[in-house]
Amino acid sequence: GENVEQHPSTLSVQEGDSAVIKCTYSDSASNYFPWYKQELGKGPQLIIDIRSNVGEKKDQRIAVTLNKTAKHFSLHITETQPEDSAVYFCAASNNNDMRFGAGTRLTVKP
Amino acid sequence: DSGVTQTPKHLITATGQRVTLRCSPRSGDLSVYWYQQSLDQGLQFLIQYYNGEERAKGNILERFSAQQFPDLHSELNLSSLELGDSALYFCASSVAVGEGETQYFGPGTRLLVL
């Protein structure tokens, strides 16, 4: 089955800097890659996703890139703000069999 | 607000007991998923239902069971509870099954077993 690895497990940046979180997956048949943000005491919220026929997708300060050959995808957050502080999860899905990375705790220091 | 609701928000019980967690999917969603999240851990997939039928099973213990009812709400039953079952339990829903269906998560039920 699918195995998703996520790095780093913790990330601390200064407000205004960029943050990058990377994930690798093992199943070459995976075709859907969502990213979730989980704030303390809440459920994960979808922030951006990318499908296997696209290499990059951007939504304001958030972007995701996908390298199918290398089987890795990354989340990029630019101009970070304190409210970006949360745990971020990547996931890889093959026809609804979705596996999650272990999560990255992002702290944005004002 | 994802549109997925879960009750109760918090649950405190004792070892050996049985509890039922409830989930209502987003309007129109046919598929429901259950996940367990232990302290500082990732999301462990437990089980998936689609339109009333079990579709996929993950790392779900034999002491745990679930079902999806005709109105599409789902219940997760946890029995013979142990201290290690203390965790956040999330329900997610998606429109259907197939390629790249986005899952929307509920707010979770925090279970504490004493």
Image (cartoon, rainbow, N blue to C red):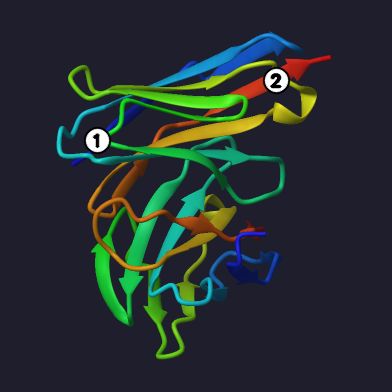
Mark 1 nearby-residue class (10 Å; few <14, some 14–19, many ≥20)? few
Q: Secondary structure at mark 1?
A: loop
In the rendered image of this protein, does residue A107 appear above or below residue A88? above
Quadrant (top left, top right, bottom left, bottom right) of the C terminus of chain B: bottom right
Quadrant (top left, top right, bottom left, bottom right) of the N terminus of chain B: bottom right
Residue B75 falls left or right of residue A16: left
Asked if labels 1 and 2 share a chain, the reply is: yes
Residue A73 falls left or right of residue B1: left
Tell me the subunit letter for badge 1: A
In front: label 1 or label 2: 1
User: Residues under labels 1 and 2: Cα distance?
Assistant: 32 Å
In the rendered image of this protein, does residue B27 appear above or below residue A10? below
Q: Is residue B82 visible?
A: no
- Inspect the image, locate mark 1, and give the three-letter code of the amino acid beneath it: Asn
Image quadrant where residue A74 sits? top left
Q: Is residue A91 visible?
A: yes
- How many dots with numbers? 2
**Label annotation for residue A75:** none
Would you name the residue on which mark 1 appears? A53
Q: Secondary structure at mark 2?
A: strand
Residue A57 pos. (x, y %):
43, 30
Would you name the residue on which mark 2 appears? A107
Mark 2 nearby-residue class (10 Å; few <14, some 14–19, many ≥20)? many
Tell me the subunit letter for badge 2: A
- Inspect the image, locate mark 2, and give the three-letter code of the amino acid beneath it: Thr
**Residue at left offset 31%, top offset 51%:** B100
Residue A105 pos. (x, y %):
61, 25
**Residue at left offset 21%, top offset 17%:** A70
Of residues A63 and A97, the one drawn nearer to the viewer in this rendering: A63
